[in-house]
Image (cartoon, grey):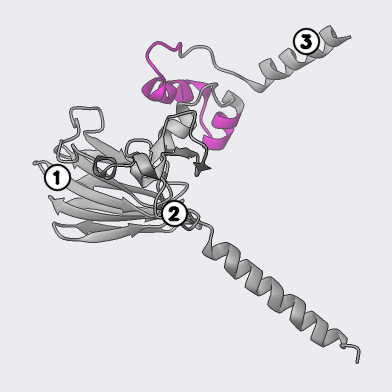
Amino acid sequence: MEMNYHTTLFMVVALLSITTHLYVANAADPPLLQDFCVGTNDPNASVFVNGQFCKNPKDVEVEDFIHKGFHIRGDTNTTLGAEATLVDVNRFPALNTLGVALARIDFGPFGLNTPHLHPRGSEIFAVLEGTLYAGIVTSNYTLYDAVLRKGDMIVFPQGLIHFQLNLGKSKAFAVASFGSQNPGRVNIADGVFGTRPRILDDVLTKGFQVDETVIERLRAQFLSKNLSTNTGRSIIKLLAQEDYLADDTY
């Protein structure tokens, strides 16, 4: 008996729904296929998982599962007055394939953990000392903000902009856990004004509705000091260069 149109359509939709569910469920770090895969820089290692070579399980020792130094305070004597120290797979190879990472965030008086996002993992953030102002910006530009005190926790969903500001005259301290061995971090200001090569002047002046002078002043705050701030790129220069190259081709 032939299946009618509605039955066929229902089966296709059901299959797509199941497939999508399975895909979303595995959108984070992939599940384990072995007990562990301690990362190693040994080029002779034969197994490569999640961007890391696996150390031979026979050579793994208990020391491979231990990371020391998490008690050391970060340097808050900086422009922003805060420092986040991330212990991810790059610093602690045993995290490879385990889908977790940890960070400590130290704040000087009124220090700021600048607006940023983590492209590959969600974060749970716990205040251990001090009082912080924290916020999350969603994809529809809604701000969720709150004052957090010792013992409070907040969740920052993967890929959303968030920040924390110390509201006190004394130091503050927090710990953050991530659902990825390598959550990554993109600081918003650096991602716009500190890129190499620079984003075209025409993009930033139009995007922020300001003139080039303002853009240059902002760039000066985020570009390396040994990089000249008066070598802006413009669409006119870029097109002229492309035309020049095209002429040379023929």
Write down the residue under mark 1.
172
Residue 59 placement, left or right of 198: left
Circle nearer the viewer, 3 or 1: 1
Q: Residue at x 72, y 77 (%)?
A: 13
Residue found at the very far left of the displayed protein: 170
Q: Provide the major secondary structure of the magenta segment.
A: helix
Question: Mark 2 or mark 3: which comes first in sequence?
Answer: 2
Disc on res. 158 = 2
Whole-angstrom CA distance, mark 2 to mark 3, is 43 Å
Q: Which residues are magenta?
A: 203-228
Q: Position of residue 149 (x, y in %)?
A: 15, 57
Question: For residue 1: magenta?
Answer: no
Question: Mark 3 or mark 1: which comes first in sequence?
Answer: 1
Vertical comparison of 176 with 87: above or below: below
Residue 88 visible in this rendered orientation of the protein: no
Tell me the crowding category of disc 2: few under 14, some 14 to 19, or many 20 or more residues within 10 angstroms, Cα based.
Answer: some
Q: Position of residue 239 (x, y in %)?
A: 73, 19
- Between 104 and 227, the one lying in front of the other is 104
Q: Secondary structure at mark 2?
A: loop
Tell me the crowding category of disc 1: few under 14, some 14 to 19, or many 20 or more residues within 10 angstroms, Cα based.
Answer: many
Circle nearer the viewer, 2 or 3: 2
Question: Mark 2 or mark 1: which comes first in sequence?
Answer: 2
Write down the residue under mark 3.
244
In the picture, the quarter occupied by the C terminus is top right
Q: Residue at x 67, y 15 (%)?
A: 237
Among the 4 quarters of the image, the one containing residue 109? top left
